[in-house]
Image: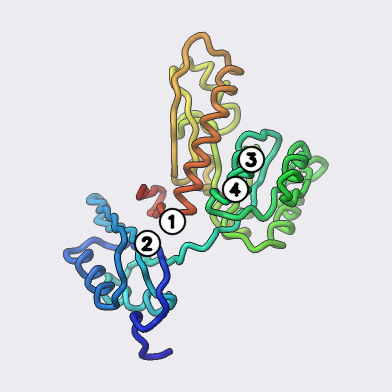
Amino acid sequence: MVGSTLSSLKKTRMVILIQCIDKVGLVAAISTLLAKEQINIISMREHVDTVENRFFVRLVVNGCANIPLLKTQLNNVLPADAEINVNPQPAKKIIILVTKDHHCLSDILIRNHFKTLGADVQCVIGNHNNLQEICSRFDIPFHFISHENMDKEMYENELLSTITKYEVHYLVLAKFMRILSPSFIEKVAMPFINIHHSFLPAFIGANPYRQAYERGVKLIGATAHFVTNQLDEGPIIAQQIIPVNHSFTAADMMKAGKEIETAVLAKGLQLVFEERVLLFKNKTVIFE
């Protein structure tokens, strides 16, 4: 369809995410191009990181079906380093990794069942079989891959073999209490979203509630973040905290923390699935 204009093509609702070096006139250039092509801007949120001289914008538009043509048009009016993501809001496909805790998984499965998740759960993979029954109730395939009597490489190869059977956009670690190797993360080559049971960067690693209890903190929290090669140091998507006091045992903190873990993971997934998150270095820009 060489030489076609965007305005001559079928229209559809889209989200456009852009980041690039900041300069004068970027908003005007983008809005002028879209107006010329008769693409209606429904909402537009922008942010400039003055320290990094970086421009970020999220647009919701009634756009065209030819995404490559639109990206070419935008590249022509933006700086050479521009990163452009044009997404016609398809349902994301996810795989969930779990261990024994059910609270985060249960919430995701209910949202998936009632079509409010913003994604479709393809399967659940557990290194224990405790959560197989609840997956069966929601007609979600459950794969039990035990880590016992396997070294790390063998176990991760089994995981990878199962994951690659599905078409998937994200892996969600819903209380998956195992550390994945950098080589596995690289092989999977898709974003991992994890829920960590502390207000990062405090109390990284194992047993954060025990760490918090021993430190005598007055607030505990949870963090949804992207997974990187550095343990619990990936870009943060969402966080919340709740108060605790001297009367709380470590077990009390863990019990109270489960509700906030569920809420924070749900919020983080919503932000990602709605294309509200832009990544730059090890930070996120969130357009809520």
SS state under label 2 = strand
Question: Helix or strand or loop: what does disc 3 sit on?
Answer: helix
Q: Which residue is mark 2?
A: 17
Q: Which residue is mark 3?
A: 105
Q: CA distance from mark 2 to mark 3?
A: 29 Å
Instruction: Kindly identify the residue that appears in the image at 37 percent across and 66 percent down.
Output: 83
Mark before the other along the chain sequence, 1 or 3: 3
- Colouring method of the image: rainbow
Mark nearer the viewer, 4 or 1: 4
Name the image quarter holding residue 256: top right
Q: Is the residue marked by circle 4 packed among few (<14), some (14-19), or many (20+) residues within 10 Å?
A: few
The residue lying at 46 percent from left, 31 percent from top is 199
CA–CA distance between discs 4 and 2? 28 Å
The CA distance from mark 1 to mark 3 is 22 Å
Give the amino acid type for the residue marked by disc 4 in the picture.
Answer: Phe
Q: Identify which residue is drawn at 49% across, 9% down.
A: 246
CA separation in Å, label 4 and label 1: 20 Å
Residue identifier under label 1? 275
Residue 114, numbered circle: 4
Spatial separation of the CA atoms under disc 2 and disc 1: 8 Å
Query: Along the line of sight, which residue is nearer the eye, 53 or 57?
Result: 57
Query: Three-letter amino acid code at disc 3?
Result: Leu
